[in-house]
Image: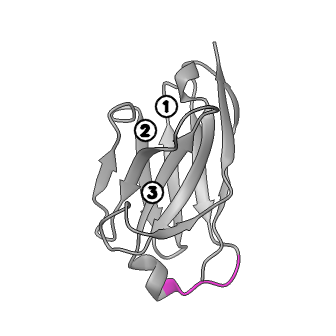
């Protein structure tokens, strides 16, 4: 079992940047965790939770259309962490961002575990 904790959210002016991190501060099965796909989702008030980006065990990234060219996902298997670098932020990016570990090597849509989320607010 891995407890996921997101950090790095906050207030930022449109056009600015934020970097989110997903960490596992508690006990972790490193071998198992490194075999899983890591990803980020976001949810704005009144909207469905939506996919943002994912990165497979083999470091292959996938991005939602709105994230491509602005967001970069990465992972550090040694530390069992995932980061999401967000650039050129716009107010539409305002949401709670959640980290997910999927129990599959390359499918973020598989069943998995979630963090509690971190708020990102972008103002014009």
- Judging from the image, what secondary structure is the residue with disc 1 in? loop
Residue 116 location, quadrant: bottom right
Q: Confirm or deny contact between disc 2 and disc 1 (CB under 8 A).
A: yes
Mark with earlier residue (1, 3): 3
- Name the residue that disc number 3 marks: 39
Q: Is residue 121 magenta?
A: no
Residue 90 seen anywhere in this rendered image of the structure: no
Q: Position of residue 32 (x, y in %)?
A: 45, 85
Residue 34 location, quadrant: bottom left
- Name the residue that disc number 2 marks: 71
For the rendered model, the colour scheme is one colour
Q: CA distance from mark 1 to mark 3?
A: 17 Å
- 10 Å crowding of disc 2: few (<14), some (14-19), many (20+): many
Query: Viewer-nearest of labels 2 and 3?
Result: 3
Apparent side of residue 2 relative to residue 112 in the rendered image (left or right): right
Q: Position of residue 81 (x, y in %)?
A: 54, 66
- Name the residue that disc number 1 marks: 87
Q: Position of residue 11 (x, y in %)?
A: 72, 29
- Judging from the image, what secondary structure is the residue with disc 3 in? strand
Give the quadrant of the C terminus. top right
Mark with earlier residue (2, 3): 3
- In the rendered view, would you say 112 is above or below 26? above
Q: Position of residue 21 (x, y in %)?
A: 59, 55
Residue 63 seen anywhere in this rendered image of the structure: yes
From the image, give the main secondary structure of the stretch colored magenta.
Answer: loop
Mark with earlier residue (2, 1): 2
């Amino acid at each position: 079992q891995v407890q996921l904790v997101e950090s790095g959210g906050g207030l930022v002016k449109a056009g600015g940047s934020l970097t989110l991190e997903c960490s596992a501060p508690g006990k972790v099965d490193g071998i198992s965790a490194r075999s899983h796909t890591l990803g980020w989702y976001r949810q704005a008030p009144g909207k469905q939770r939506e996919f943002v980006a994912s990165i497979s065990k083999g470091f292959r990234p996938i991005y939602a259309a709105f994230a491509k060219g602005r967001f970069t996902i990465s992972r550090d298997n040694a530390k069992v962490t995932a980061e999401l670098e967000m650039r050129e932020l716009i107010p539409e990016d305002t949401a709670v961002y959640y980290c997910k570990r999927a129990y599959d090597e390359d499918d973020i849509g598989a069943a998995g575990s979630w963090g509690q989320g971190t708020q990102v607010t972008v103002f014009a």
